[in-house]
Image (tube, rainbow, N blue to C red):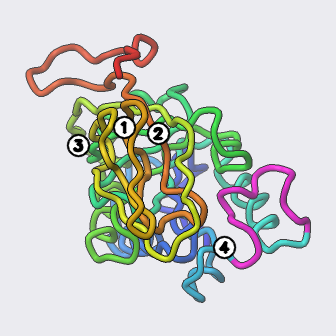
Amino acid sequence: MRVEQLGDGEPEVAIVGSVHGDEPCGARAVQRLLDADLDVLEPVKLVVANERALEENVRYLDADLNRSFGEDVPEDAHEVELAHRLADEIRGCTVLSLHSTQSHADPFAITAGFDGSISDIVPRLPVVATVDTQGFGEGRLFASDADIIEAEAGLQGTETAAENAFRLAREFLTAVGALPGSAVEREIPVFEMGESIPKPPADEYEVFVENFERVERGETFAAADGHELVADDPFYPVLLSPYGYAGQFGYRGQHRGTVGQSSDGANSTSVSSLSSAQ
């Protein structure tokens, strides 16, 4: 694990990159922040989490680091020690964890609820949506004692994802007051994570719909070896891709409202009053 710092003092802000070793965009953003020699207004901790997996261009060595913050991981797994160290490094901080994905080209945020400063920061990030995963996924980084936003910067392994990651990092630092300037506030749709969509055994998979766009009842949204999967009920695809997961396409999400400010300057919507519109 590589840990660096911008500015002097005890950081209360952190950026984490490459929790997964096959997602280099976060590590590249960290290096660009260091190379930029920024004149920060408050100290910032920079972490490249899984250096060994990054060197081998694999997601993890022994266990998924973003599932290693719980108890159901072998004690001798390389990522277990990393999880303890990472949790210590970010304790008490406001954190942006940078990722990339196979599901969507445009950046989007992932949260576990909207406690603390999360609801203020998310609308100031250049993202097209936010996925609320509260209650999903044991052992994730969200279990740490910190206010955490994950950001999917774009398609895994692309230069666009690397550029997006750096922009996300800069705008995050502006939003939390670590860099001078005024962050642009946007109105960001919020989607609640729903049940997973399993993939039947097949050699070839296809997805025909876009993430965060409503799928109607009766609409064909995917296929396995040419066998079409049709929606029984309306849903919003979340993290949907042909090959992003081994055993599932992604998740059936629901639109739960918005957070942030609309383009006409209307008042921010309170996260606590998000609608249950579907």
Instruction: Tell me, for residue 181, which label it has, or none.
Output: 3
Q: Earlier in the sequence, mark 4 or mark 2?
A: 4
Classify 10 Å Cα crowding around label 4: few (below 14), some (14-19), many (20 and above).
few
Q: Earlier in the sequence, mark 1 or mark 4?
A: 4
- 45 above or below 185? below
Residue at the image point whose x is 59% and y is 33% from the top: 134
Magenta span? 61-75
Q: Nearer the viewer, residue 164 or 116?
A: 164
Residue at the image point whose x is 45% and y is 64% from the top: 224
Q: Earlier in the sequence, mark 2 or mark 3?
A: 3
Q: Amino acid at mark 2?
A: Arg
Q: Nearer the viewer, residue 237 or 15?
A: 237
Q: Disc 2 vs disc 1: Cβ atoms closer than 8 Å? A: yes
Q: Amino acid at mark 1?
A: Tyr
> What's the distance in space between the residues labelled 1 and 3, CA to CA?
35 Å
Q: Earlier in the sequence, mark 3 or mark 4?
A: 4
Q: Position of residue 90 (x, y in %)?
A: 64, 50
Residue 51 falls inside the magenta stretch: no
Quadrant location of the C terminus in the rendered image:
top left
Classify 10 Å Cα crowding around label 1: few (below 14), some (14-19), many (20 and above).
many
